[in-house]
Image (tube, grey):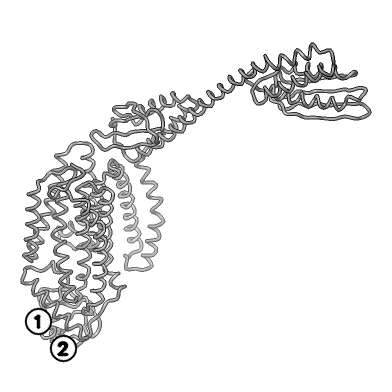
Amino acid sequence: MRPGGSQGLGCEPGMVRKCLLVLGPLLFGMLLAASLWARLDGARLPARLEWDGHYWRVLEAGLPLAAGDEIVDIEGQAASFATLLGDPVKLRSRAELEQWLEEKRFLYGRMRSGWLRLEVLRQGQLVPLRLSPARDSWREWAREAWIEVLPACFFLWAGWTTLARAPRRPESFWFCLMCLLTSLCYLASTPFRTGVMLHPTALTCFLAINLASFLFGPAVLLHVTLLVPERSVRTGSLVALYALVGLTLMSLDVPLQVGVVGSLYAAVLLAVVWATWRYRSSVHRQQMKWIWAGYVWGLTPGLLFNGLPLLLGRERVFEDAVVGFFLICIPWFYSLAIQRYRLFDIETLAEGSLVYVFTLALICLLEMSLLAALGGGFALPTATVILMALIASSYGAVHVRVARLFPRKEPEVVQEFLARASGRPSAEVLDCLYQTLQEWPAPQSLQWIAGQARVGCDLYLGEPVTAELQLEAPRGLLLGPLQHGHYTSRVVLLLEQLARQAALLYQNARLFEEEAVRRESALEERERLLNDLHDGVGATLASIRMLSGQPEVSALAGDALFELQHFLYDGLDYTLAADVLVAEFRAYGNRILPDFVLTARVEVEVVNRSAGLAAFRVYRETLQRCRAAERLRLHLEILRERMVLVVEAGEGLSERVELPCQAASRRT
């Protein structure tokens, strides 16, 4: 299947697609507005009628009509089956269709005058009547037309979004066209629901749109079915199909048109069965599962609630329009199959649907039990209110308990990976991810590929189906088909979470390793500088301190050497023995003070060299301030978190100084 090109009926040029995307909603809006205008402009008899085989019988009406009246004559013409018929699909021949159009035009002209003369058969006697036709408001139109407008909107939305999201697939164009035709068919039938007499031009337009979309909609649906999952029909066959539908439309034979439409729908089902049997790849099989699910959800309510009772000779449970609302499932599931969106979630949908079916079955059982207990039905307003309140309040509890009967165990793969890979180096993080993926989801093949600058999981719907994990790392992972199950949206979501967590751990480990390397390099460079300064300037200052005969020069040289050491060791994790630091303190005090005593209490073995030098600076400044004292007593405590220096200078003079101290370190 080629993504581009425009050969035959298999694909349309890009400009045609864009026109369809723009003109489709525009035509829909125009027809919807025209339907409302035609309904407001037209008129009808103020009664609900039913054809009994001979006359139109009044079921419900206001004065002067009465329930049970049989309309015999309208404006001097006999009231036939076609006279007051709303939907022309019940006509039996082309002649009846032409008669229906003529009588509609005639009645529209008479109703526009404001009055209408009738003859009705009431209790066996002919009674002449003169009545005013009824006109509907927009609220009445909305109340009656919503059952067609809502499915029409959904069909249009399904086709438009499919073509917008998958513009290069040829089946998406034809699917959008089919949805547009079906939505127009729904809208064009709204003016005919209540037998309103429309303007002749509007009547002709609505009838033409209704018949054309009614015939070509199933034909295009068959075309789409023959393109999904792969094109399986020749262009000549499609040309013949559309030619046959066009001839049927021009015949204006309503029974023939209904028969052709039924045959087209039967051909669609046969095409689905044939495609299901023919295509065996995993992607194609999932597409056909979605299509089958659409037909099951779309047709089952009508067959179960209306078709089966009719076969048993009973009345329909619901109106055809109500069960026909479920037909929106068909385009919805077709759209998912064409877009290949959440393609492998059909099993998950089936499990969830089973839970809801059981829940609704229990709720219905509760409803019937309550109705039997109340001794009535929905005709009782009080019982109805109580019943609906009880059903609404019990739904949540019933659903939770039913869901427990169908447990779904979610794998804790992300937590297991985090427990396995946390604190590991970057290379081991990737190895842990590889081991985790081998355990879950256990693909048939798992191989390393080139990494990309992104994080996430991408699913590739090829043959075979593969998934690609990227971690913003030098290597990514390519997962082959799964040994058990498919790549459902839940599996892809878990793989996405796993990829993000793995990328986070990998990036953290890599940054830590880079920081360790950078720090090691900085320390090596600092050590080289320390060695140069120590061997050069430090040695010179030490020599001056030792060889100088002047005490002032030696003291200045010692201070300069101390400041140099403080500069060199500031900010580095070098340590100094606490006993050595105390000895330095004591030696310095003995050198500059005649009567000096230093006691010490040490709780740690080593301190940070930079913190020790900072404490020594404060210690030196304190001694310089107290040089005038005759006797000086000091007490030094080196604790784990701080240093405390207590100075007693005699005569009650004392001073307490606290300094931060780091006892832990890496380097000596």
Between label 2 and label 1, give the one nearer the viewer. Answer: 1
Q: Amino acid at mark 1?
A: Ala
Q: Amino acid at mark 2?
A: Pro
Residue indicated by mark 1: 78
Residue that appears at 19% across and 52% down: 174
Residue 326 seen: no
Q: Quadrant of the N terminus?
A: top left
Q: Position of residue 368 (x, y in %)?
A: 31, 58
* Label 1 crowd bin: few (<14), some (14–19), many (20+), radius 10 Å: some
Viewed as shown, does residue 68 lie left or right of 365?
left
Q: Position of residue 374 (x, y in %)?
A: 35, 63
Looking at the rendered structure, the secondary structure element under dot 1 is strand
Instruction: Report the Cα–Cα distance between label 2 and label 1.
Output: 13 Å
* Residues under numbered marks 2 and 1 in contact, where contact means CB atoms less than 8 Å apart: no
Q: Is residue 645 above or below residue 234?
A: above
Q: Nearer the viewer, residue 161 or 331?
A: 161
Residue that appears at 24% across and 84% down: 63
Looking at the rendered structure, the secondary structure element under dot 2 is strand
Name the N-terminal-most of marks 2 and 1: 1
